[in-house]
Amino acid sequence: MTSGFRIERADREAFDIIVALEQVIFPEDPWTPGMIADELDSPFSAYFLAIFEPDGGDDGFPLEVVGYAGVKVVGDGADVMTIGVLPGGRGRGCGSQLMETLVDHAELQGATSMFLEVRASNDSAIRLYERCGFARIGVRRGYFRHPVEDGVEMARSLSPSAR
């Protein structure tokens, strides 16, 4: 685990936090509150919060949510629905920790492969995903809307846990 962060499963009570994170992390094309509510209510989806704990979190200082991620597992396939970290939390391993959590969850659910789409211009995210074992498998022309941009399709194999 990266020092200073812990990952917690998000439930419906995290709705307001996720809506606020979405507005800051993805200001050009945030998910609507309805989309977020649908995802949090879906039996196929799991969402996780990255919480920064100054000095390990044992000193009484408030904790701060700095990122979140979600995965949808249907059958043997998993889709990374979203992953994002606030600007102040980037570059410290939080995104890697969130992705590791998504992979672990998908494997526990029996998924054998995982997919995602990322903006073609988002070089730092593409590098993160490649470090996490994803490979480019294609391009979706005009996949992102605001602004319109191609999406790079990426995938990785998983090792599902026996259930």
Image (cartoon, grey):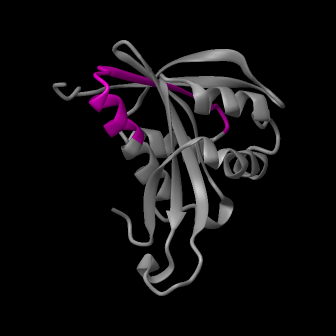
Q: What are the residue bounds of the magenta stretch?
A: 102-121
Q: x, y percentage for residue 114?
A: 40, 24
Q: Position of residue 103 (x, y in %)?
A: 36, 36
Task: Judge by depth and name the residue closer to the eye, 119 or 162.
Answer: 162
Residue 137 located left or right of residue 11: left
Can you say whether 34 is above or below 122 in the image?
above
User: Among all residues in the image, which is located at the extreme top?
Assistant: 75
Q: Quadrant location of the C terminus? A: top left
The picture places residue 15, in percent across and down from the top left corner, at 68, 44
Please tell me which residue lies in front, 162 or 13. 13
Q: How many marks?
A: 0
Q: Is residue 142 left or right of residue 116?
A: right
Please tell me which residue lies in front, 71 or 39.
39
> Eyeballing the image, is 79 above or below 31?
above
Q: Quadrant of residue 31?
A: top right
x 67%, y 47%: residue = 18
Q: Is residue 107 magenta?
A: yes
